[in-house]
Amino acid sequence: MLKLSNVESYYGNIRALKGIDIEISEGEIITLIGANGAGKTTTLMSICGVVPPRHGEILFMGRPIHEMSPDRIVALGISQVPEGRRIFPFLTVTENLDMGAFLRKDKDGIKKDIEYIYELFPILAERRNQAGGTLSGGEQQMLAISRALMARPKLLLMDEPSLGLAPLVIRRIFGIIEKINTENRTTIFLVEQNANLALKVAHRGYVMENGRVILSDAAQNLLSNEQVKKAYLGV
Amino acid sequence: MDWEYFFELLLGGLTRGSIYALIALGYTMVYGIIELINFAHGEIYMIGAFTALIAANVLTMLGMNELAVLVLASVVAILYSAAYGFTVEKIAYKPLRQAPRLSPLISAIGMSIFLQNYVLLAQTSDFLPFPSLIPELEFMEPIAHIISSAEVIIILTTAVVMILLTLLIKYTRIGKAMRATAQDRSMAMLVGVNVNRVISTTFVIGSALAAVGGVLIASHIGMINFYIGFIAGIKAFTAAVLGGIGSIPGAVLGGMVLGWTESFATGYVSSDYEDVFAFALLVIILIFRPAGILGRSTTQKV
């Protein structure tokens, strides 16, 4: 479904991605783990076209997308839950969800999906007219995921959804991630620093270091891999 | 206290404030979206006034009546100014989108100087008479010594324009996209907003509003030259900062506060002190509210 070949991206003159290859098939949960500054977020931003790659190729459902503008890539069915949630702080909860469906034209469908999300997260329904910036971290994360789902994506990119949240909330968020994958058949590309957690929900994983993919395997195998254990699982 | 004089100043201030507000909206909207002080904005207002002057003269020669001339000249001025705003953004700011923040600012100053001199060469440096396009309303006769028909039209037009703008920003798709882009540009891209189109739209709307201001005030005061954009621009920019740059209601409030300050300072002290009071007020307000009256602090929960 998504294929990155030899992708190189730069921030100014800094080569943040040094030629990476990643492949994701439909229906999978794939995780990308690695330390701070390894290039995980840059990988997602390159897929979305916000930081377009200078070299290499990105194919989505067989179409090259590495030269497209972000709005066209979203239109093809790739949504992102970005790092730090990035809720529009002065838009209400409902308006934030509306923005998620920005490219959709089916008004009734949008309305139905919003109702569905309010059923899924009653706390968001309660706060529907509140500004997004006033929500707690966990609520914002739920809103960020919901906003991405409003686009009815084929591929959902998630960047550090566990960042700064309480363990109980994290467990809830990961439950939702699995549910989105099994119920909606949405393919998920999950970037995480919390490798232990990510490898438990994912089917396969990639390990990144210093702008390169150094390891890729089934999630099970990565969990028992000595190198991964030492560097990322803290055991 | 002379209440009639007081009301005259109050309404005079409201008129001035309306014009400042119309121009200030362009500054504040552009700043809200791309954090740029568009110094060429005052010139767009001046170009609006000149376009209206040319259109009005042509239409009058063709023998049209006063009201038709006013409406048509305004439409031409709005379209022409909007085209200018659009083009200025494409030429002077868009190529510098990724550049350090000072570069587009310098580019804006350059654009402002260029447009002033272009009009200076194309027209003259003299003040040109501007026809009084706004008709005298008969039912206004009894209170004409307090407020003129032109002032009423200016205040009403501004009010209507403000309401339309508010509805646009609050309820339409492009309005929501504008707010989202202002709050988080790259996130707006990630939900599929074409940010370049939003920025262009912002420039077009801001320029159209400035053109409305240009036609109204030129018709009220009765003369224009190439330099009017600079003065009005500085004042409107002050109004935008006063109200809180980036805030749309702030620009309106800032315009009104500035208009009233100038009007009362002129009326009760001396017109020589008009600017002294206006800028003293700016300093005082910024000491106590650095983000402006309605400006919001940038802190938010993460």
Image: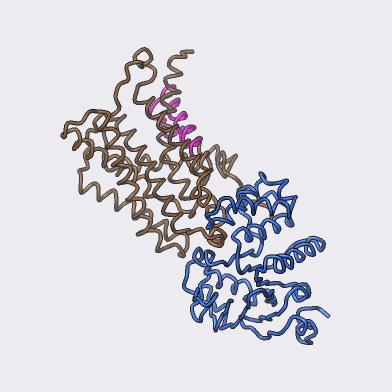
Chain colours: A blue, B brown
Q: Does the segment drawn in magenta span residue A63?
A: no
Q: Residue at x 43, y 22 (%)?
A: B9
Does residue B129 appear left or right of residue A211 in this picture? left
Q: Which residues are magenta?
A: B251-278
Q: Residue at x 51, y 42 (%)?
A: B248
Give the position of the C terminus of chain A as an image quadrant.
bottom right
- Which image quarter is the N terminus of chain A in? bottom right
Residue A43 sits above or below residue A161 on the image: below
Q: Position of residue A181 (x, y in %)?
A: 70, 68
Residue at horizontal 59 percent and vertical 83 percent from the top: A21
A70 above or below B72?
Answer: below
Total number of numbered labels?
Answer: 0
**Does B20 sit left or right of B68 as displayed?**
right
- Which is more toward the observer, A108 or B195? A108
- Residue A175 position within the rendered picture, expressed as x and y whole percent measured from the top left: 77, 65
x then y, percent, for residue A165:
76, 61
Residue at image x 58%, y 82%?
A20
Q: Position of residue A12 (x, y in %)?
A: 51, 73
A107 on left or right of A131: left
Magenta part mainly helix, strand or loop? helix
Residue B274 inside the magenta-drawn segment: yes
